Image (cartoon, rainbow, N blue to C red):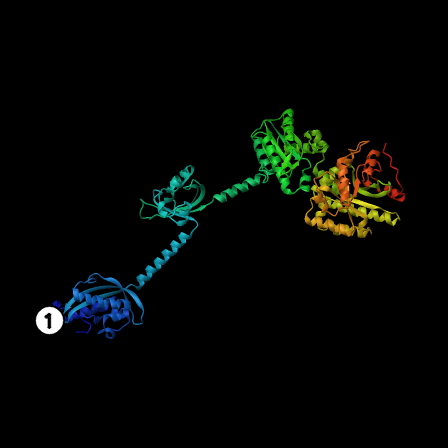
């Protein structure tokens, strides 16, 4: 009999030798064939049998462990527990593992500890009671469990860390799972308060039909479905959520299905899109329609067959002075107030728009008679002329309005708006607070912007511009002090074109810089020509546009033109309008200071027409103030007081500046100015602007002028 073979005493009764050998052979074959380890120990825990499976499991040969205590195959904690258990069992006869089995740990020959499942039974043998243990290696099983647990943990961490809303729904559309993000979204501390509730309960009433119709269809069409619905939270807040939903059902259970959904709050995204759409058609400052929105609205109304309507084109007179003399915040506030006045002065169905900085347009529905339109336009003008009170200041503006009427002046948006804008130009040409109706005759009188731009370019290209020179005289002794360079244009077809017409247009359309360069170059050339002819040429004043000061190479071009013709900087006075001077950026103010440092004189033209203050004026390197002709015209014969003129003279004196009066046409005006301390005068009383040849004669014959008022 092999040493590792144990046979129970009741199993050999009545067997002959042949039968015993057969039984032993079968028993040994079974033990060797078993994959699990099989170990037999006696009542003292000594190993009596150790099969091949045990050798493979523990790494010992049978002869190495037979005769040793079985605790030799256990790590320390289990070894102590085994000895205590055996002692308790022999003392009490109570067994806890026989026929049951449990998970324990074994120790390999190399010291590695591994999990195993131990099943134990006992047998009575001729050698006494034996315990047989079957050891099943759980290493792979435990590793698989650990991997599964790790995967589940990773999945749970991923799900719980997602900011997306994640849910599962059963076939009744009740929630069976929600992630923490969804709990937070619905202000729930724990998910169980949502579990079992119907998703429909959390959806806005108007969107519930979307879910009830589309979600069940996913069981037949397993494609990913995207749904946008409004979710209602416990506090009543309604938010848009975009759900991506797909089936998560067991295909074998046709009577049961589940859906899993992934949701993202898109409320801000939709609001942003709405805002973009709004801004695309509305003016951001005033909230009125912009040019694009106006066209869409007018096209829609006209295409619907409007039987009568009128278009009003509105412009705030001299609004640019507000921006030039105040900060842009003040200008924006006035524009918003003006927009509100326009909106509140017309009917709700009327269309209101802001096209550019101070240009507005209104469509009056159902109003097409000139009398009715005129009445509404006058009401708008009165409202816009009311004072604009901002903090402790008050501003006064007026408005001009141009009108076109449907269908007399056109049946398309383009024709009607173009007609209203043409009428507005006519109104503005008449002055302030004016109103004009469009007519075919008006259209014929007006030259289009394209024609005017072409004319200016041709004048520059073909030398059609001309410089004239208006002398300036000292009031104290009537001697020639200098002259102002003025620009004139005679168009071969249109005749004389007023600078008031083409200069602002050139500024708006990017042509003023080219014109200004031509003026500087031509004036410097003329000054050089006169001096080379031996004439004494006094200081020459040249008007400078704000757009020229904005050019980065303005100073270089100016100095280059003077150097080319040997003109000293002191011979030139640069004239800048009051509004332009006071609206300069820090960089442009520094440029003006730099030019003054080079030797140029700096004059503020049209002084008194803006909103400048003493602090603003004193911050500029100005040498001369020019009183606007509008104030000079108010001086009547025998006048002893003109507060504005007196204030300007006093202000200039306090800052050490020369005072020049423009538009002096009468002896009374000259005497009033002289008596009140004005230094210099120019105007028709002394001389009209002279062409170069006449100015040359005047320079040649420089003498004291006994001015006589023109007859």
- Residue 63: x %, y % from top left: 24, 75
- Position of residue 327 relative to residue 116, above or below, is above
Q: Nearer the viewer, residue 444 or 429?
A: 429
Q: Give left or right: position of 333 versus 238.
A: right
Q: Give left or right: position of 673 versus 616.
A: right
- Position of residue 66 relative to residue 615, above or below, is below
- Say which residue appears at 12% left-offset and 72% top-offset: 17
Q: Quadrant of residue 639?
A: top right
Which quarter of the rendering shows the C terminus?
top right
Furthest residue toward bottom: 63
- Residue 129: x %, y % from top left: 16, 68
Q: Give left or right: position of 626 versus 258.
A: right
Residue carrying label 1: 16
- Position of residue 336 relative to residue 596, above or below, is above
- Residue 538: x %, y % from top left: 84, 46
Mark 1, Cα crowd under 10 Å, few <14 / some 14-19 / many 20+, is few
SS for dot 1: loop
Furthest residue toward left: 14
- Position of residue 515 relative to residue 634, above or below, is below
Which quarter of the rendering shows the N terminus?
bottom left
Q: Give left or right: position of 312 versus 165.
A: right
For residue 457, say whether it is visible. yes
- Say which residue appears at 54% left-offset and 42% top-offset: 276
């Amino acid at each position: 009999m092999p040493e590792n073979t144990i046979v129970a005493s009741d199993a050999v009764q009545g067997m002959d030798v042949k039968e015993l050998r057969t039984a032993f052979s079968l028993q040994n074959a079974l033990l060797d064939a078993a994959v699990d380890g099989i170990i037999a120990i006696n009542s003292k825990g000594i190993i009596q049998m150790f099969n091949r499976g045990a050798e493979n499991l523990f790494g010992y040969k049978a002869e190495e462990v037979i005769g040793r205590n079985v605790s030799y195959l256990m790590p320390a904690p289990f070894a102590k527990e085994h000895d205590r258990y055996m002692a308790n069992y022999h003392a009490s006869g109570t067994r806890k593992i026989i026929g049951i089995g449990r998970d324990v740990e074994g120790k390999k020959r190399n010291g590695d500890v591994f999990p195993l499942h131990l099943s134990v039974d006992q047998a009575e043998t001729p050698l006494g009671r034996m315990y047989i243990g079957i050891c099943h290696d759980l290493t792979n099983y435990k590793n698989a469990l650990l991997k599964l647990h790790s995967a589940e943990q990773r999945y749970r961490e991923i799900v719980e860390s997602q900011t997306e809303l994640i849910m599962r729904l059963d076939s009744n559309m009740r929630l069976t799972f929600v992630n923490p993000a969804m709990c937070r979204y619905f202000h729930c501390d724990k998910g169980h308060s949502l579990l079992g509730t119907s998703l429909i309960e959390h959806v806005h009433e108007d969107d519930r039909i979307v879910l009830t119709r589309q979600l069940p269809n996913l069981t037949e069409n397993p494609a990913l479905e995207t749904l946008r619905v409004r979710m209602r939270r416990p506090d009543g807040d309604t938010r848009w959520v975009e759900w991506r939903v797909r089936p998560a059902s067991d295909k074998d259970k046709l009577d049961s299905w589940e859906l899993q959904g992934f949701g993202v709050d898109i409320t801000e995204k939709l609001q942003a899109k709405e805002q973009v759409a709004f801004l695309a058609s509305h003016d951001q400052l005033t909230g009125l329609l912009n040019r694009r929105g106006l066209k869409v609205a007018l096209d829609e109304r006209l295409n619907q067959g409007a039987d009568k309507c009128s278009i009003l084109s509105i412009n705030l007179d001299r609004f640019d002075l507000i921006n030039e003399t105040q900060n842009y915040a003040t200008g924006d506030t006035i524009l918003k107030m003006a927009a509100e006045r326009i909106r509140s002065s017309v009917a709700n169905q009327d269309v209101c728009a802001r096209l550019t900085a101070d240009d507005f347009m209104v469509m009056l529905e159902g109003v097409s008679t000139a009398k009715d339109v005129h009445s509404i336009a006058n009401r708008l003008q009165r409202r816009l002329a009311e004072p604009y009170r901002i903090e402790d200041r008050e501003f006064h503006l007026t408005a001009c309005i141009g009108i076109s009427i449907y269908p007399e002046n056109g049946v398309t948006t383009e024709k009607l708006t173009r007609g209203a804008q043409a009428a507005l130009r006519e109104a503005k040409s008449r002055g302030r607070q004016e109103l004009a109706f469009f007519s075919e005759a008006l259209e014929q009188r007006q030259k289009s912007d394209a024609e005017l731009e072409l004319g200016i370019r041709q004048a520059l290209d073909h030398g059609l511009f001309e410089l004239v020179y208006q002398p300036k005289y000292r009031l104290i002794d009537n001697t020639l002090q200098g002259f102002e360079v003025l620009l004139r244009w005679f168009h071969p077809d249109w005749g004389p074109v007023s600078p008031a017409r083409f200069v602002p247009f050139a500024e708006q359309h990017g042509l003023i810089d080219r014109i200004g360069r031509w003026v500087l170059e031509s004036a410097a050339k003329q000054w050089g020509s006169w001096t080379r002819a031996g004439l004494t040429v006094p200081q020459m004043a040249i008007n400078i546009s704000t757009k020229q000061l904005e050019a980065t190479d303005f100073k270089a071009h100016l100095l280059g033109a003077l150097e080319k013709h040997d003109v000293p900087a002191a011979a030139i006075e640069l004239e800048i309008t009051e509004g332009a001077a006071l609206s300069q950026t820090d960089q442009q103010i520094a440029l003006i200071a730099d030019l003054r440092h080079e030797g140029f004189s700096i004059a503020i033209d049209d002084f008194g027409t803006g909103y400048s203050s003493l602090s603003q004026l004193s911050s500029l390197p100005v040498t001369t103030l020019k009183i606007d002709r509008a104030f000079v015209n108010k001086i009547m014969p025998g006048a002893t007081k003109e507060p504005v003129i007196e204030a300007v003279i006093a202000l200039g004196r306090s800052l050490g500046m020369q005072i020049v009066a423009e538009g002096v046409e009468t002896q009374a005006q000259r005497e009033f100015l002289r008596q009140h301390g004005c230094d210099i005068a120019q105007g028709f009383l002394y001389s009209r602007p002279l062409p170069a040849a006449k100015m040359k004669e005047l320079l040649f014959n420089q003498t004291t002028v006994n001015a006589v008022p023109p007859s």
